[in-house]
Image (cartoon, helix red, strand yellow):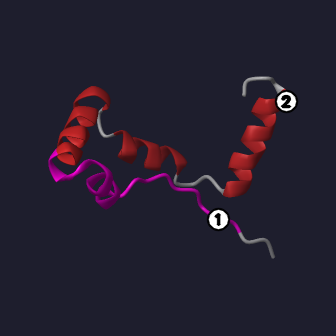
Amino acid sequence: MTTTHIATVEVPFEALVKELGTKRAIEFISEIRKCYGNSVVELRKATETLTIEQIEAEIKTLKKQGKI
């Protein structure tokens, strides 16, 4: 039996606060949402069903095509 892992991309707010401070982290999130919408939610929806194996296969394909 093969185990599959679901890939997720997420940066916890706590990590932003640690690096930027509370005020700047809030400003950063507000600025990103104004410019790009809620890209984290959109990215999560787009990738929530991808497995690590699928991502690896896509990377290999792109490398063969010279795109990365």
Q: In the rendered view of the protein, which quadrant contains the N terminus?
A: bottom right
Q: In the rendered view, does 8 fall on the left or right side of 25?
A: right
The residue that appears at 18% across and 53% down in the rendered structure is 22
User: Which label sits on residue 18?
Assistant: none
Relative height, residue 66 to residue 38 (above, below)? above
Q: Is residue 23 left or right of residue 42?
A: left
Question: Farthest right residue?
Answer: 64
Which of the two residues, 3 or 67, is positioned nearer the viewer here? 67
Residue ID at (65%, 56%): 51
Magenta stretch: give its range: 4-23
- Residue in the foreground of this view, choosing between 64 and 44: 64
Q: Which structural element holds mark 2?
A: helix
Report whether 22 appears left or right of 41.
Answer: left
Residue 61, magenta (yes or no): no
Question: What residue would you read off at disc 1?
Answer: 5
Q: Residue furthest left?
A: 23
Q: Position of residue 63 (x, y in %)?
A: 79, 31
